[in-house]
Amino acid sequence: MKSRLTYLSITLHRQQLTPIFLALSIISISAVDAEPNAAKSDQDKLAWKPKEAVRNVDLEYFKVPEGLEVTRWATSPLLYNPTNIDIDSKGRIWAAEGVNYRRHEGRRPGGDRIVVIEDTDGDGVADKSHTFVQEKELVAPLGVAVFDNVVVVAQPPHMLVYTDMNRDLKFDPKVDKREILLTGFNAGNHDHSLHSMTAGPDGKWYFNNGNCGAIFTDKSGKTFRMGGTYKGGRGEWYVDNRSVAGQKSDDGFIWTSGFSVRMNPDGTNAEIIGHGYRNSYEHATTSLGDLFQNDNDDPPACRVSYVLPYSTAGYFNRYGTRSWKQEKRPGQDHGRAHWRQDDPGTFDVGDIYGGGSPTGIVFYENGALGEKWDGLLLSAEAGKNVIFGYQPEPNGATFKLDRQDFCTTNPEGQFAGSDFIIRDQKEERHENWKGKESPTQFRPSDVAVGPDGAIYISDWFDGRVGGHADLDDSCSGAIYRIAPKGFKPNIPAMDFNTTEGQITALSSPAINVRYSGFKGLAAGGAKSLSAVEKLLSHPNKWVAARAIWLLPHLGDEGLQKCVAMLDDKNPEIRLTAYRALQRADKDFLPYVKKQAADQSRAVRRDVALSMRGLPAAKSTEILTAVAKSYEEKSYDGNDKNYIESIGLGAENHENEIWLAMKKELGSENPEDWSDSFARITWRLWPSAAVGDLKARAMSKKLSHKQKVFAVESLAFIDDQTSANAMLELAVDTSPVKEEARYWLFRLGTGTWKEFDLMPELKKRGIYDPAKIVVNEVLAPAPKDKPSFTSKDVLALTGDAKRGKDTLMRCIMCHQVEGNGPDYGPFLQGWGQTQTKDVIARSIIDPSADIAHGFGGYTVLLKDGKKVQGLIISEGNPVIIKSTGGLTQTIPRSRVKSVKPMKHSLMLSADQLGLKAQDVADLVEYLKTWK
């Protein structure tokens, strides 16, 4: 997490562990490693005591929905610095600790711990804890998962598995087993590394890793090369993820750093189900099989998203060779740029909520909170002292995610100690805390649901989150419980060896407890069918869905019942049944043709995804049918995930599939293509389409927007023929020469570097560095303070008609009804989302709050000239667009420096000669301009 669990500015020195990668899967630890489990007391084993007394945020600061309450379930010394938690079938909380986090590595000489915390008398307050395992190799592990007597710990470079053979809740190497399940994950004592494991409703195990990347081999012998350009934040790096960027993994696909994995519990048949993250700290799988995650940002674009299987979040380009910053488009909104939302090949961004430090996440399906909260996605946000709540609603091929503060200590949003805060507000707020700990010290590291149906939150507690630092020398930690007022925990007994106990476990609110139920019922085969069938009629849809996943495992009768559900009236049941067949490795191909025409966009999306990896002979007809439905039933130009699912299903067979789609959906005359087929072409990246796209770009029939889109489509086809076509579109007589030249300059030093475009640009007279004449262009800053304020403006009555006329003064920077350059922010519709005060201040003093993506830069040349404007490309050449839309290409050899400007490129009201009444008129018009 990019919280206090983020970077530290020291270099860590530990012995390299690369040779361990070659170790056998089962490894015994030494007696020294096992020292904490000897007869000594826990305190003796720790050989460590915190420097300060225990500290906690006062309960009075916690705000939760009406009818619920927050209680403190556990606090130090029962646990310290909790990084991640899980809850077993008896309600015991297992916590991974990070006392040795970052610059404090070695603070606890015996290593960090996995600790077990208990409420032995059932009064709702923990009263006992003990060490399950402590090892020197455990250094701020970021994940712990408990599956009955199997405990999984994320400790880079390894995913460790401890099996408590005698079930005494203490690891003893003489009796118990310690395995390295998988290895090869970057990096040690680093927050962008290996994270927690959770079980899915399909009986698979799921985990994720941040953008430190990995090179790991599953137990089936497949090696996955998770490459990317990132290597920061210090820590200890075990593999060179940058060296494998752009290389295919053994499954035949290219993946990038920051990823999610689904696999069998024994480590076989691993598959990447999402990639291109920055640092997704954890993810949550629902009982319908949907995966949600939160993800960190380069501020301010943190997000909570539905993860479209196999797609990328967009932090890197599709090869992992360039970051989003290098791929940013001119004038692009920061959030869309950060997650490459305007590029083909990325999944829908979900909810971007700004700066922050997201950590644990869980999906609440059933339990003590009541039906109102069933289907609640909870996302811990340490930077903002909050647990966000969402109740995702299906929306085409993705989900609508409306955010609320489910639990917070800081409802007024006066944040402190976070990277996205310009200044630390701690001192000015201190007197309001009445001598108590600051509510901004609440740093939720994880959130989980117990078998009692309550919600539990682990608190890392600190005055700092992110920024390479932690400040709390007490290492205080706490676990808070959210439950109905007056709640009394009631955990049903579960015998995992009986069908009744397995059904009870499968019905549990606690996700990893459910796995034990699934495992036992699946092993029972046909004998389990009767009990599982009864669960299908459970009034809670999430509990009922868990039974669907089991049906294909329960003999021929169970399989046929699952197949029959493909015709159910409820699209969620049809979707879950289809997924269950796939995950159980049953033949789903006999049913794909019918499902490809399903009324549900989500079902059709999953059908397209299921074609991935199949030969084109088997997938072409189905993908064409899904694409046809895109035109007939769902095309609105906005369902990014739907078109992405078609592209993912076609991957590695794009040309063959696209040519078949062209016959069915397109036309031999590319000018006659529908906009939806043009967008399908944009996503498939088929080199077979190069000629048609070039023809569309040169068309006299199509609109300029359609022609520009054809140029953009060419830019994402990584083929020499596409580069050649782009060169031909860059000539002076081309209607899209400016757009083509932009892509040539950007790609020529990026994805198309191997095509050696620069000599060809010179040969064609498009770009000759020796002949470039650079004109100095300055954007002057206002000389004085504004002559009037927004208060003065709001005191006047504006006239929208006059405001429309006045707006024409702004066409040096803004497009107004087709006039003016694409330079400043697009204003049409903007005013409807802003208050009048904000609009007025933006006009009066544009430097006070510069829109993301429109910060100006000064290019200082070696001859002393300055060019100020928007940087279009910072490669070679530097491309900059200045006031009035003047675009210049500047050879990098002539540039001395490129630095951000301190003032806006936009002229102020005074500079434009606008009076207070003029601004009032503008405000009135912008509020109504749709």
Image: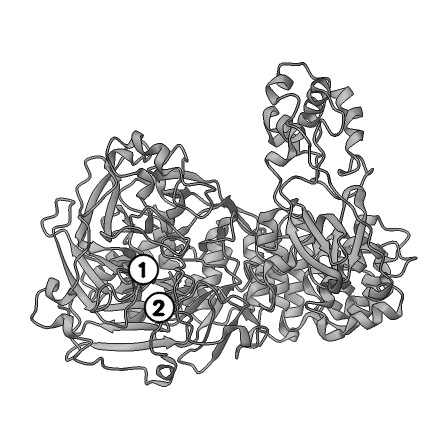
Task: Tell me: residue 37, above or below residue 570.
Answer: below
Residue type, numbered disc 1: Val
> Which quadrant does the N terminus fall into?
bottom left
- Tell me if 227 is positioned left or right of 790 in this view: left
Q: Please state the horizontal and vertical placement of residue 197, each as a whole percent of the image.
A: 35, 64
| Label 1: element kind | helix
Q: Earlier in the sequence, mark 2 or mark 1?
A: 1
Q: Please state the horizontal and vertical placement of residue 721, each as a whole percent of the image.
A: 79, 72
Residue type, numbered disc 2: Leu
Q: Nearer the viewer, residue 652 or 40?
A: 40
The quadrant holding residue 908 is top right
Q: Nearer the viewer, residue 535 or 46?
A: 46
Q: Looking at the image, do the residues carrying marks 2 and 1 touch, with CB atoms under 8 Å apart?
A: yes
Q: Please state the horizontal and vertical placement of residue 310, each as a whole percent of the image.
A: 53, 64
Task: Tell me: residue 760, above or below residue 313.
Answer: below
Q: Residue at x 57, y 54 (%)?
A: 339
Task: Tell me: residue 615, above or below residue 778.
Answer: below
Crowdedness of circle 2 by 10 Å Cα count: few (<14), some, many (20+)?
many
Q: Is residue 381 visible?
A: no
Disc 1 target residue:
532
Q: Nearer the viewer, residue 65 or 587?
A: 65
Colour pattern: one colour
| Label 2: element kind | loop
Disc 2 target residue:
554
Give residue 361's mark.
Answer: none
